[in-house]
Amino acid sequence: MELMPELARRAAAIGDWDAVLTMAEQHALNPLLYTHLRAAQVSLAPLVSHRLQGLYVRHRRSNRIYLQALSEIIGALSRCGIDARVLKGPALMNLVYADPALRPVSDLDLLVPPQRAIDAQQVLAALGYSATERQRPASLRVHHHLPPVTRSIDGLLVHVEIHHDALTRDDSCSLKLDETREAPVTFELDGYRVSTLGPHEMLWHLCEHLVGPLPRPLRLISLADVIGWSAAFDGTLDWTRVRNRYPIVLNVLALAHQTHPAPREHRGTRAVHAA
């Protein structure tokens, strides 16, 4: 809350809100922007205020549909005895962000044991999901996930990827769902117990996704995810273990410190916001 006066001061100096909202949408930050501007009691022109609120409502509806889809998929996989870990967005919106609408989701990434990846894809097909490209026998060897599948739900095209490795082939390491994995963090969703990666491996995965070897554009929501997870699980994380096993995490947090205070509150609890 101590940053709100500074936020209000900087917002008052903005002359081109169209550019700000366009850039915020590119970085998936409009719901956070909307929430923080309201908390700072920033007065906006009616057109800007309505556009920002509209973007927030749109993401809230989209996220609700994605969570409904996730619940259905987790239930179907569970009935088939397929263990799964939901990666990134859907887990973060439930475990880090105070309001699920604050963390836009554009797809569902599910990590399953390599030997059950094809089975999981068939479960999705039975639920009405269609592959965007033809399944090839070499997919498991060449790619870290199977071809994406999609399904239209309430007018929204929901994208799902079944991963047999949470990291790409361009990474120098692997993160597969096997007996060596850290115990998962879990959350409730529509009566189902949904699992994601353990606290250390999730932080590692988020950092690899942020600055991994693939030439991908930096999206600030990914940086907010790292900061938010670090704050929410600060009391759970063994930072000596992080330093020894996942040095990339400390490098990312050192860079993040340039734009965000170090985690101080919400030790072991959900962070109020992730930025």
Image (tube, helix red, strand yellow):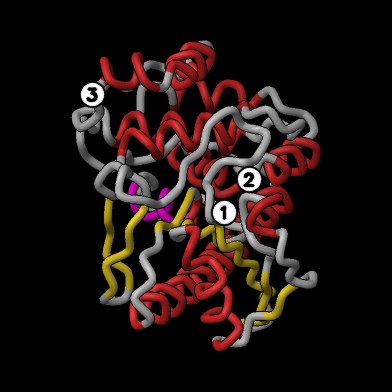
Report x, y in % for residue 128. 61, 87
> Is 148 in front, or is 16?
148
Report x, y in % for residue 148. 68, 65
Residue at position x 53%, y 48% from top?
165
Question: Which residues lie in the magenta part?
Answer: 90-95
Using residue 59 as the reference point, say whether residue 187 is left or right of it.
left
Mark 1 in CB contact with mark 2 (< 8 angstroms): yes
Give the mark nearest the N terminus, 2 or 3: 2
Res. 136 image quadrant: bottom right
Check the image and report above or below for 110 versus 203: below
> Is 149 in front, or is 187?
149
Question: At label 2, which amino acid type do we have?
Answer: Ala
Mark 3 lies on residue: 238
> Is 153 in front, or is 138?
138
Query: Which mark's residue is nearer the viewer, 3 or 1?
Result: 3
Residue at position x 60%, y 83% from top?
125
Mark 1 is surrounded, within 10 Å at the Cα level, by few (under 14), some (14 to 19) or many (20 or more) other residues, namely many
Query: Which mark's residue is nearer the viewer, 2 or 3?
Result: 3
Give the mark nearest the N terminus, 3 or 1: 1
Mark 1 lies on residue: 104
Mark 2 lies on residue: 28
Residue at position x 66%, y 35% from top?
219
State which quarter of the image contains the N terminus: top left
**Element marked by disc 2:** loop
Q: Of helix, strand and loop, which mostly describes the magenta segment? A: helix
Report x, y in % for residue 269. 22, 40
Res. 74 image quadrant: bottom left
Distance, label 2 to label 3, CA atoms, is 30 Å
Distance, label 3 to label 1, CA atoms, is 29 Å
Res. 154 image quadrant: bottom right
Residue at position x 27%, y 56% from top?
186
